[in-house]
Amino acid sequence: MVLRELKIGNITVPVPIIQGGMAVRISTARLAAAVANEGGVGIIAGTGMSLDELINEIRLARKMTTGIIGVNVLFAVKEFSDLVKTAMKEGIDLFISGAGFSRDMFSWGKEYNTPIIPIVSSAKLAVMAEKLGAAAVIAEGKEAGGHLGTTRPMKDILPEICKEVNIPVIAAGGIIDGKDIANAIKLGASGVQMGTRFAASEESNASKEMKALYLKASKEDVVLVSSPVGLPGQCIRNDFYNLVESGKSKSIDKCNACLKRCNHNFCIMKSLINACDSGNPEEALMFAGELVYKIKEILPVKQIFNNLINEVAEVK
């Protein structure tokens, strides 16, 4: 199989791979630019950033690549509208959001001429997104890392969505290698979104402890955690996960009210920041996709792309 370019509105993506927007600070300018330089779509995760931080990351990425750069912001965060509008004012190429659904982002996209790509887990929501003006949708299944909106696998959701909309459908969840990409395309996807594989790259901001955990993980180590966001989150079992699930995690000393709604069972922002901070792994939430155990090496993004393209080419 040969990978074909992906068209999203007026944007042409040479290699139909979108890098997942992994927060907090896993996906920053360095990773996004590296992906964009290989012909994919590089994504900066704006969740958990200040407005100035997001501006700086976007501008840094622009200095590092002439490729396609987008931003992803979790709908659940309190500063959602300010982060989205700030990113659009900076002239990002496209915007992605999940863990909830915003109608307003479509009007902002029209105002700033920014393509909007919501993450959806049902045909019903995909149809609504298309009517509101989505340039594409990301069909995400239960295999994805981070916050999940469904218990159904991507292979079941994807064909249903493809049947109901006329915009590009990007497959997400459980895509680690070229064979996974080829299978998604055979199911009707126009492209794929990959998070976990790029979290395990040299350019990722994940801590060395998090990357080491990825390489050691078995299938049984991938579990669901009860996130303060109000959605289950897919992660790797570690000491922090065990504390959360036993109800013994540390109480929140100071709440910064970063979410619109929070269950306060632990601080989601602090635990995700710790995943980038190698000095505090015992208090880190290590998000990962269901098939993380398939990853055996931490590689540079260029090598990951070369491997993926060669693996796709081997599929008949």
Image (cartoon, rainbow, N blue to C red):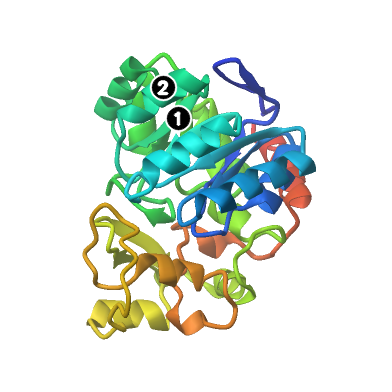
Q: From the image, tell me which residue sits under label 1.
A: 117
Q: Which amino acid type is shown beneath numbered disc 2?
A: Ala
Disc 1 packing (10 Å; few <14; some 14–19; many ≥20): many
Q: What residue is at 57 percent from the left and 59 percent from the top?
A: 26
Pointer 2 with pointer 1, Cβ within 8 A: yes
> Is residue 259 visible to the viewer in this orientation of the structure?
yes
Q: What residue is at 31 percent from the left and 84 percent from the top?
A: 250
Q: Secondary structure at mark 2?
A: loop
Q: From the image, tell me which residue sits under label 2.
A: 134
Q: Which amino acid type is shown beneath numbered disc 1?
A: Ile
Q: What residue is at 69 percent from the left and 27 percent from the top?
A: 2
Q: Classify 49 as above or below 85.
A: below
Q: Nearer the viewer, residue 89 or 37?
A: 89
51 sits to left or right of 4: left
Q: Secondary structure at mark 1?
A: strand
The quadrant of the image that shows the C terminus is top right
Q: Earlier in the sequence, mark 2 or mark 1?
A: 1
